[in-house]
Image (tube, helix red, strand yellow):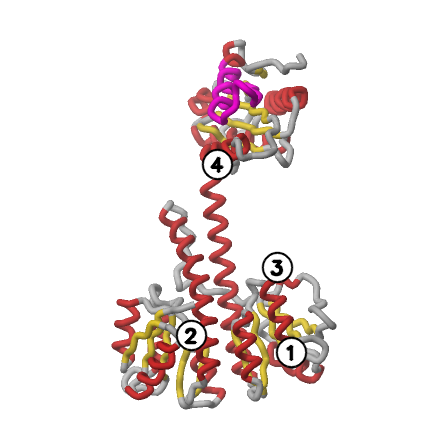
Amino acid sequence: MTARVLVVDDVIQNVKLLEAKLTSEYFDVLTALNGEDALEIIARERPDIVLLDVMMPGMDGFEVCRRIRANEKSAHIPVIMVTALDQSKDRVAGLEAGADDFLTKPIRDLPLFARVRSLVRLKVLMDELRMREATGEDFGINMDNGINNQISLEGARVLLIEDYTRVAERISRYMEGLAVIDIDGGSLDTVSSPDLENYDLFILSLGLDKIDGLRLCSQLRSSEHTRRIPILVLVDEDHPDQLIKSMELGATDYITRPIDKNELLARARSQIRQKRYADRLRHNMQKSIEMAMTDAVTGLYNRHFLSTHLDNLMSVENNNHKTVFLLMLDIDKFKRVNDSYGHAAGDEVLVEFARRISNNIRNIDLAARYGGEEFVVVMPESNFEHAYYFAERLRMAIADQPFSITASDQPITVTVSIGLALSGDKNSSSAALLAAADTALYQAKENGRNQVCCCEKSPAE
């Protein structure tokens, strides 16, 4: 996976060295010699990742990172801090300034390439989620998710996979106050803890006794239930190959032994925050999809979704070729409700009407608001007797129990007319089936309303 990388360093030799290394791995490299130029390039070019030197005259790397994070347009660009400082407090300072990782000079090639590729993969995922959220906002669905909204870490859960008891207990003490931490020693082939999908972070030792930590990393990343949960690996400095392999297998961060408490906490906070932010984007995306498919007043599916569903159900590519019954429902004299009690009362009736429909249909049936006071129920895999019985039961569920509305002390009576149509030779398309049900509905209204009429009788009748 290639990407555009911005290298920022005030020493031209360092810039040229990193540029040569990254170019050899087919990355597209941009360069800047100070913080001000870096911020201008970020605003203009939108790089995929920033390699940022800490010790620069004027604006240092920490300040540049803070400004990147404070700008809504650049806040989600991954930043790797690069410096000759190797003290834990320096790494923590970089992480707390918003950096995603901290590398010390001289930079080894393999960790650098693995880290860059890992962060680029994360950015691609985040960009896709944000793009889908922006699409929802373009349709008027405002999720109110500016960068100033804080991601809460409250109730975070972490699973530590470590079979060395003393180390596991020490890490648990370190994590107190940040998250509830569970310990799993690992079995011969897998993790034994239940409900893995409920964790916010896995901390995985690559030095497990009974199981290959790399294989476990691969299993966690490939499982549908855990693939979106970040993995922070614990690795020995004298095992760089393990580190590189774990990053290739999907680990999202690492910390080398001996473990520093402050660095561990900073990296854990960063990973949990990123995970919860991604979860929020996915939730908002799902919400926008649901809002695009459903009617805002009743919560039933809307006409567009109904049409698509019915087209798919009756398409020639559908190998089921099963009978489809369709009910077209129209609330009788609904205009009188609006005229007498107001449109708010009309909406109350629509909501309760939709609720009674939902309470009476099967799981495989689909109910939708067709428009105004018209509704449709699609019933696949049924027969005439059942469909007609359902329509009558639904008619009585509406008529036999008056509707309570805020604008009236007394409940009001509501009735419904229903047209029933069956797919077949004459109604082989969704448009024809809808037209047939509409014809039956018109007949029910002509016959006096509050009744069920069928477009055609069952062949068995």
Q: Earlier in the sequence, mark 3 or mark 2?
A: 2
Residue 104 horizontal side relative to residue 253, left or right: left
Asked whether 88 or 33 is in front, the reply is: 33
- Is 428 a magenta residue? yes
**SS label for mark 1:** helix
Q: Which residues are magenta?
A: 419-442
Q: Residues within 10 Å of mark 1 (few under 14, many from 20)?
A: some
Q: Earlier in the sequence, mark 2 or mark 1?
A: 2
Q: Which numbered disc, 2 or 4, marks the residue closer to the eye?
A: 4
Separation of marks 2 and 1 at Cα, in angstroms: 24 Å
Residue 401 position, x and y percent, is 62, 24
* Residue topped by disc 4: 305
* Residue topped by disc 1: 172
* Residue topped by disc 3: 225
* Residue topped by disc 2: 98
Q: Earlier in the sequence, mark 1 or mark 3?
A: 1
**SS label for mark 3:** loop
- Screen quadrant of the N terminus: bottom left
Quarter assignment of residue 318 = top right
Q: Earlier in the sequence, mark 1 or mark 4?
A: 1
